[in-house]
Image (spheres, helix red, strand yellow):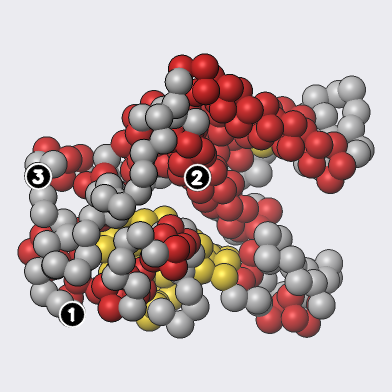
Amino acid sequence: MLILNMGILSNPTWALNSYPSSPPPHSPDPSAQQILLTPQDTKFRTALLISGLTLATGLYGFTSWWDNSSSQFEVRQEHWFGQDSPNGGADKLGHGFSAYTATRLLTKGFQWAGHDQSQSAWLAGLTSGALLTGVEIMDGFTAEYGFSTEDALMNLTGISLGILLESHPTLDNLLDLRLQYWVSKDARRLNDYDPVADYSGQTYLLITKASGIPTLNRYPILRYLEFAMGYGTRGYQPTDGTDSQEKSRNLYYGLSINLSQLLNDKIFPSQSSSLNTVTRHLLEYVQIPGTAVLLKHKL
């Protein structure tokens, strides 16, 4: 899905954040106190994290998704991003984005458990992969969903991207995968306010940050710019079921503002502050509406 120029990984000594007020996102916080964990502590926390996630996923699935299960396993072909596919493929990007976000957040969880960065990224990927594949298999025994090969492959794509960025800070400083959401006209018209299913309000963006390019990072203004390209559908969901809504699949491209970099340089410069931490992590996954100028190309 994503073709990345791996040549940028050959020079790990890039001074990606040479601008004095902005230390690299992966640089350690000198004020943070290190908590020493014994091997037994690490094993306990790891088991607690995995078992807790498994239990929570299972309980939510049985109460929300699998209440209409059957003994017959069904595979459904959803035809990726075609005009006649369900949701125009926006749900496929939703799967990829969810798997990507889960992997990155779980990496922090396994670091809490006492694993190093590399181990945490791989454990997060394996755990996400096992849980999401299990969900897809259980979907196969329901009349409503069925097992989707496309969903399973998009989950693995998102997990792979998450592991890649967590394992290579240089690449992580250059790229973000974000979701921009604004309640769609269809959702307001139908009084159906569900951000997860409101595909008409979702736009998925791959962001290239100028702050991750040394030549541009040195300039106080240019370092806050980003190039954005993405995909979104309109008119598929939510729907009134009459098939009267105009459906469109759209590519987007344009410029956005690196709001995280701007806030943490000018407003929350201390890396030890909670607001710095929140904005730095949240804005890695969320594109705030109004911070990007995007051109649209209908497919």
Give coordinates of residue 271: x percent, y percent: 32, 61
Tell me the residue that label 2 is attached to.
105
Secondary structure beneath dot 1 equals loop
Name the kind of residue labelled 2 in the image.
Leu
Question: Which comes before the other along the chain, label 1 or label 2?
Answer: 2
Q: Is 180 on the left or on the right of 205, as rendered?
A: right
Question: Which comes before the other along the chain, label 3 or label 2?
Answer: 3
Name the kind of residue labelled 3 in the image.
Thr
Name the kind of residue labelled 1 in the image.
Ile
Tell me the residue that label 1 is attached to.
221
Whether residue 120 appears in this view of the structure is no
Secondary structure beneath dot 2 equals helix
Q: Which mark is residue 13?
A: 3
Q: Is 40 on the left or on the right of 237, as rendered?
A: left
Q: Are marks 3 and 2 in contact (CB under 8 Å)?
A: no
Image point (36%, 69%), residue name: 260
Snapshot quadrant of residue 122: top left
Crowding at dot 2, Cα within 10 Å, few <14 / some 14-19 / many 20+, comes out as: some
The residues bearing labels 3 and 2 have C-alpha atoms spaced at a distance of: 26 Å
Snapshot quadrant of residue 173: bottom left
Q: Is 200 on the left or on the right of 220, as rendered?
A: right
**Nearest the eye: 242 or 180:** 180
Whether residue 195 appears in this view of the structure is yes
Give coordinates of residue 116: x percent, y percent: 36, 29
Q: Quadrant of the N terminus?
A: top left
Q: Are marks 1 and 2 in contact (CB under 8 Å)?
A: no
